[in-house]
Each structure stands twice: as C-alpha cells, then as structure tokens.
Image (cartoon, grey):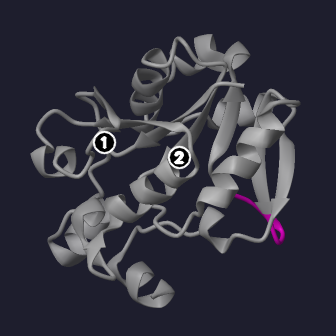
Amino acid sequence: MKTAIVLTAAGMGRRFRHASGEHKLLTALNGKAVLKHTLDQARASGMEVVVVSRPEDVAIHSLLGDAMRVLCASAGLGESIAAGVSACTDYDGVIVALGDMPWLTAASYRAVNRALDTYPLVRPWVGDRAGHPVGFSAAFFPALRQLTGDTGAQQLLQHHPVHYVPLRDRGCLEDVDYPDDLRRMR
C-alpha cells in the first residue's frame, strides 16, 4: 500500500503562544524545533511526508527540506487535513499526524501503516486511550477533502468502525499545547 503521512503544521498554537510568546512548532526541544523532531520521525518511517502549513509561516517552510509542501490559508485542522489529502491523489492511504507531537516514533507510523493494509480506518491504542496518528484508506479521501473547521476528522472516527492498533508509544498521546508540556516530557 502506498501511503503518505499528512503532517498538519498550519495551526496558530494560540494557547502556547499566549503562555510563552513563541510559536510552539518552532520552540526548541533538545536543541531543535518541535516540528523538526516530528518531521524527522515521520521521515524515518520511510513514507512520503506531506506538510500542510500557512503561506506566511516562512520559518516553518525552512525546516521542511524535501518534504512535499501544501499551503493552506486557514489554520483550521479540518481545512489542513482536506488540503493535505487533496495533494495525495496518487496514494492508497494517508496517515494524518499533528505537527506538535514530537515524541511520536517512526515505529508507530509504520504500525499504523501496516494495519492500513487490512483495515480502512486505523488508530493507535496506548494503555486505555486512543492516540495519533490516524490512518485512512483512499475510500475516506472524498470525506476528508470536505473537512472544515477545527474538529478535524472526529465525525468520521465517530461514525465508522475504527481498528485500534495496540502500541506502547506514549508519544501517540502526548502533544504540545503549553510550555509545561515540553518541560514535563523532557
């Protein structure tokens, strides 16, 4: 199965910015930007990576290297996913990942991808919680391309059977919303 990782990086990060004055995806974590950690793990999975960002986020663009870039004028998660999926017409599936999850491992991306070979909608299960990233077969592309707003693909997850992949990667559950999240996970 030919799968791309759609990495969303168009959000405003308002809570983080309000607390610290910084852009959370550009904030340093162990010597490199949060987004760079996330991007490096996505690349290490061996899949194509498509990064969705806003046109004015030049500093984010400078981190992307050879990753496919999709520009999205909206900071809404739904629009970001729609834009990323629209760029993936030659793929059999996508794995939607959030740019603010720097602890998510390449092995977790690969586990979700393996499950997509059998199941059309896949999500990690860590401990007693559903996590990220979420895998979608091409059957979901038309619905994903119609997403708007900030809720992302929640309605699809609520109205379709989800296959949960048991994983131990706590990075599937941990994102960066506040500066304390970085300190807590270091």
Front-most of residues 184 and 51: 51
Q: For numbered disc 2, what is the local secondary structure?
A: strand
Q: Is residue 126 above or below residue 53?
A: below
Quadrant position of residue 183: bottom left
The tally of labels here is 2
User: In the figure, is residue 110 to the left or right of 176?
Assistant: right
Quadrant position of residue 61: top left
Front-most of residues 68 and 72: 68
Amino acid residing under circle 2: Ala
Magenta stretch encompasses residue 8: no
User: In the figure, is residue 34 to the left or right of 111?
Assistant: left
Q: For numbered disc 1, what is the local secondary structure?
A: loop
Residue with the mark numbered 2: 97
Q: Which of pointers 1 and 2 indicates the residue nearer the eye?
A: 2
Magenta-drawn segment: 126-131
What is the CA distance from the residue labelled 1 to the residue labelled 2? Answer: 12 Å
Q: Is residue 161 above or below residue 8?
A: above
Front-most of residues 81 and 88: 88
| Disc on res. 10 | 1
Front-most of residues 124 and 37: 37
Residue at 31% of width from left, 65% of height from top? 15
Amino acid residing under circle 1: Ala
Task: Sort mark 1 into few (<14), some (14-19) or many (20+) by Cα contacts within 10 Å.
Answer: many
User: In the figure, is residue 141 to the left or right of 9?
Assistant: right
Percent coordinates x, y for residue 20 in the rendering: 20, 77
Residue at 14% of width from left, 71% of height from top? 21
Residue at 30% of width from left, 42% of height from top? 10
Percent coordinates x, y for residue 180 in the rendering: 39, 84
Assess whether mark 2 and mark 1 are in contact (beta carbons under 8 angstroms). Answer: no
Magenta stretch encompasses residue 128: yes
